[in-house]
Structure formats: structure tokens, C-alpha cells
Image: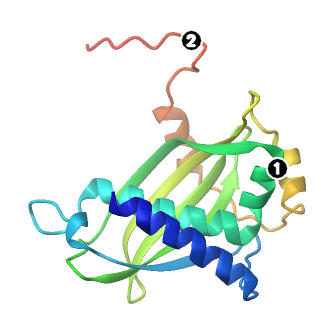
Amino acid sequence: MNVIWRTLLTLLRARLRVRRGEALDAIDVGRIRLTTLPTDLDLLRHMNNGRYLSLVDLGRWDLLIRTGLFHAMKERDWYAVVANETITFRRSLQLWQRFDVETRFVGYDDRALFLEHRVVVDGEVFARVIVRARMLRRSGGTVPHDELFEALGHPEGLPGVDGWVHDWAQASSLPSTKRPAPSVWE
């Protein structure tokens, strides 16, 4: 339940930062500061591996609000869903440790946007998350990139996506929801 409070606080802070003139361009890196709380720990007394993904979501919320994409999504009745994500751990976060979540868009393919999150302590990367997200319409269907980029003011300079990210996204994808996906163990 504590992540919901952190989410609400992140949304409030992001809106305040926009009002103070701290909006971001689509190519900028967003940063938020967090602390490892007792409810984030696992039995080994370090940050639970599943909690990282919940907390980097906060960085995504901050980026969506500060780039103006959240406002555009709300106006157009769009929403984003995570299609794939992968995380690589380098070092553990300990109780009460302060860390930053750095978030940026790293490109797109024909169907999705890619984001990178970094969990950073004193300039050192502790974990990295790659996310492939799709923008959908509440009325059904995917939002085409040209429409999405128009809503963002046609951002230029989005960094390229590494080739391995495309390979990973393709290798880890599941069949479309319109096709069967039976659970058969071999």
C-alpha cells in the first residue's frame, strides 16, 4: 500500500515542478529522489527485486507529467501499458539508502516506445530497467506514433535504441491477444 502514497506524492511533486518551470522536453532525463523503506526489503534485508519495478514506475509518472505527455493522454483518452520490461541488477539497495530514479525515452519501434530507468546512488548505477510500452486508446486500438509525436510537439533527437533491445523485445513477446497462447510446458 505504501507505493500508492509514493505515487500520489510523485504526481503532486511533478505537477509542482512543472508550475515552477521544471518541465522536461521529450529527450530529457527525469530524476526523482527516493529512500529505501522497511516495506521495500525482502528477507535478506535489501530492496526486494520486485519492488524496483514498482518504484521505477514513479520515474515514469514524473516523466509523463513533466514532458506534458500525461496531459495529452488525458485530453485524448489514451493510456499506456507496459508490454515488456527487463531489469539488470548491479548492487543492492539497503535500508534507508537514498537513491535517484533516472528516466528517459530511448526510442521507439513500429508499435511501442522504449524507456530506460536507472537506479543511481552517488552517480553509480545500481540497476537498469528497459521498458517497452504501448500507447492505447480507451475506445480501442493503438495510438500511431505520428499522432503521439504530434501531441508532444514533434520531439527531435530521441536517442536510438540499441539493437539488443529490439532483439530482446521480439524474443520476449507473447502472441497478440487475438491469438491463442496456451500454457504448454515442454
In the rendering, at what x and y percent does residue 123 appear?
43, 87
Q: Residue at x 58, y 78 (%)?
A: 13
**Label at residue 148:** 1
Earlier-in-chain disc, 1 versus 2: 1
Viewer-proximal residue among 23 and 168: 23
**Label at residue 185:** none
Amino acid carrying mark 2 in the image: Arg
Amino acid carrying mark 1 in the image: Leu
Q: Residue at x 74, y 39 (%)?
A: 110
In the rendering, at what x and y percent does residue 52 appear?
35, 61
Q: Secondary structure at mark 1?
A: helix
In the rendering, at what x and y percent does residue 163 appear?
59, 50
Asked if residue 5 is positioned above or below residue 141 in the image, the reply reads below
Q: Secondary structure at mark 2?
A: loop
Quadrant the C terminus occupies: top left
Question: Is 144 on the left-hand or right-hand side of 114?
Answer: right
Asked if residue 49 is positioned above or below residue 20 in the image, the reply reads above
| Quarter of the image where one finds residue 103 | bottom right
Discs 1, 2 touching: Cβ within 8 Å: no
Asked if residue 108 is positioned above or below residue 37 in the image, the reply reads above
Question: Is 100 on the left-hand or right-hand side of 161?
Answer: left
Quadrant the N terminus occupies: bottom left
Name the residue beneath numbered marker 2: 179
In the rendering, at what x and y percent does residue 33 appear?
45, 81
| Quarter of the image where one finds residue 51 | bottom left
